[in-house]
């Protein structure tokens, strides 16, 4: 991870661009595939406004392609049933066949002419459960799954409607490339359930731990200062006991929901310290 830059199979510039067809799929064909290939309520949309783009040469009217598209949105749910569940696709959406989208997600694009990012564009990325992606560009991105069920089996689910803020963590007007983003990152939004949003951010080659506050408009290239400082502290240790003490200190900060991710990143950058993880 030279210069604190994350290098986990990054997409090159050509891969980041994607190769989408110039014209969207016929909305009636997309709607038909969503209904026929998934269970009732698995994928919902509005045919009148949907502009669904696939890679060049792929037609959702073809049964094999339709099955591959549905597979993008397929997860394993209760009773080991594999099917899409409460995925909402609205407006302008561009997605390749190598991405994955989890349950209870929202993908939407405004399609506003002249706007820098006016679609939900997803290239070789994972959109985890409970995320919303609105007018956002993802390439080589990993949005980690939310926990959708509490210990007392109470569900924390988005409501079934077109409102893009009705998600657990929202990405809006943003760009995320070759990066890992934990749940609850961004700033709080005025909604029930302690929901958060990343607004107008640019994340490149980085790891954003769970719950990390990221102000609107922030641009991040490489690891954040918090992880850099932790790496430097670990690099300066001379004994295992010192390193273990630092790790235990990090993990004791119970108010920091991303402490495990932050420590894991530091241990990856300082591999000689990773052996300590089983002792902490």
Image: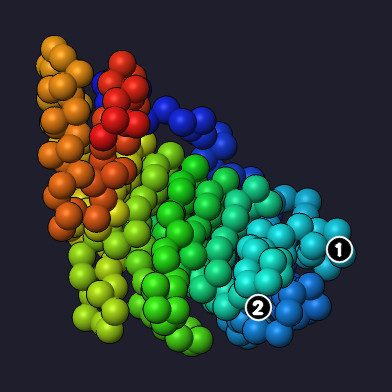
Q: Is residue 248 visible?
A: yes
The x and y percentages for residue 203 are 32, 45
- Mark 2 or mark 1: name the one nearer the start of the chain: 2
* Mark 2 lies on residue: 42
Residue at horizontal 44 percent and vertical 79 percent from the top: 153
User: Which quadrant holds residue 163?
Assistant: bottom left
Q: Is residue 75 above or below residue 33?
A: above
Q: Is residue 106 left or right of residue 247?
A: right
* Quarter occupied by the C terminus: top left
Q: Residues within 10 Å of mark 1 (few under 14, many from 20)?
A: few
| Quadrant in which the N terminus appears | top left
Confirm or deny contact between disc 2 and disc 1 (CB under 8 A).
no
Residue found at the very far front of the displayed protein = 279
In the picture of the structure, the residue carrying the numbered disc 1 is 62
Work out whether 127 lies above or below 209.
Answer: below
Q: Percent position (x, y) of residue 239?
A: 16, 14
């Amino acid at each position: 991870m030279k210069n604190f830059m994350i290098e986990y199979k990054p997409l090159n510039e050509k891969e980041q661009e994607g190769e989408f067809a110039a014209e969207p799929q016929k909305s009636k064909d997309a709607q038909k595939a969503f209904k026929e290939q998934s269970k009732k309520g698995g994928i919902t949309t509005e045919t009148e406004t949907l502009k669904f783009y696939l890679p060049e040469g792929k037609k959702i009217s073809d049964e094999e392609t339709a099955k591959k598209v549905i597979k993008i949105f397929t997860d394993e749910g209760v009773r080991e049933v594999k099917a899409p569940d409460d995925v909402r696709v609205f407006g302008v959406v561009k997605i390749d066949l190598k991405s994955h989208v989890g349950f209870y997600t929202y993908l939407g694009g405004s399609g506003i002419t002249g706007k820098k990012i006016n679609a939900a564009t997803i290239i070789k990325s994972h959109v985890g459960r409970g995320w919303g992606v609105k007018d956002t560009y993802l390439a080589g991105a990993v949005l980690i799954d939310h926990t959708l069920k509490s210990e007392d089996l109470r569900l924390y689910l988005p409501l079934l409607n077109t409102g893009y803020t009705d998600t657990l963590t929202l990405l809006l007007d943003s760009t995320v490339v070759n990066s890992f983003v934990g749940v609850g990152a961004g700033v709080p939004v005025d909604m029930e359930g302690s929901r958060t949003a990343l607004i107008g951010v640019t994340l490149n080659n980085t790891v954003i731990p769970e719950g990390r506050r990221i102000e609107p408009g922030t641009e991040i290239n490489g690891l954040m200062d918090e992880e850099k400082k932790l790496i430097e502290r670990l690099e300066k240790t001379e004994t295992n006991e010192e390193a273990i003490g630092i790790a235990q200190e990090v993990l004791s900060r119970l108010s920091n929901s991303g402490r495990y991710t932050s420590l894991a990143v530091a241990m990856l950058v300082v591999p000689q310290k990773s052996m300590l993880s089983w002792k902490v």
